[in-house]
Image (cartoon, grey):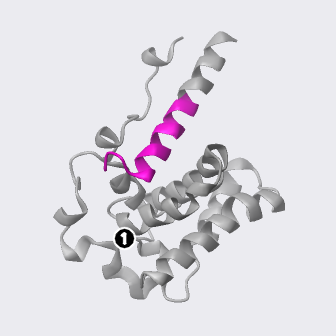
Amino acid sequence: MSRENQPSAPSDPERRVGRMFRRFEGIPEKRRLEYYAPQYEGDEAWDDYVEHKAAERGGIAESTRRKRYGIARERLAEVCAERGRHYAVARPDDVEAFFRIEAHLSDHVLRDRRFMPVYGFYEYLLNHVDHHHAYNPVLLAALEEGSETRRLWDIKEQHNDERAETRDKR
């Protein structure tokens, strides 16, 4: 069965973000993530996310925890701290700054060890009842044509398409 005939999540960020928040500027202040910053002081929400991923996958090797998740969290946390925010309440421009700083890495490393863990982290927060996240800042950053985040989104989608084609040929 071809990918076109399979039900799937929308592939472009415009369709994926839906109707609620299409621009950061349009998000009411009380719905912005920084409004919840005090909740994250000293909190390591990232650890909960990694444990959630481990439970989904039946475990994660220690090297994967370190290389895929640990480094992404450390670097994102550094960038956000320099910009005056906890990484759990990043703005789209914080995420874009992070990906631009990391752009010296290969596309493969950027996709697998930076983009996917960071995107997944905010999706986890968005869908978890203990968090008040009403949007994914990576997705909002990907809405900007010409942004590094959009470039990485497109790389991720191309990779997904290639994987689907490979599966279809089996």
- In the picture, which quadrant includes the N terminus? top right
Q: Nearer the viewer, residue 124 or 62?
A: 62
Image coords of residue 46 (percent x, y): 59, 70
Q: Quadrant of residue 68?
A: bottom right
Instruction: Give whichever of 19, 79 is nearer the camera.
Output: 79
Q: Is residue 2 left or right of residue 108?
A: left
- Asked if residue 169 is among those painted magenta in the image, a careful observer would answer no
At x 66% / y 49%, what residue is drawn?
Answer: 109
Q: Amino acid at mark 1?
A: His
Left or right: residue 135 compared with residue 56: left
Residue 52 rendering spot, x and y as whole percentages: 63, 60
Pinpoint residue 113: horizontal percent, then vertical percent: 65, 54
Q: Residue at x 33, y 55 (%)?
A: 140
Disc 1 target residue: 132
- Residue at position x 60%, y 51% in the image: 110
Foreground of the two, 140 or 123: 140
Q: Is residue 152 magenta?
A: yes
Would you say 48 lies left or right of 89 here?
A: right
Instruction: Look at the image and give the residue range highlighted in magenta.
Output: 144-160
> Which element is circle 1 on?
loop
Residue 167 on image: x %, y %: 65, 19
Q: Quadrant of residue 75?
A: bottom right
Determine the residue positioned at 49% across, 83% down.
Answer: 81
Q: Is residue 94 left or right of residue 71?
A: left
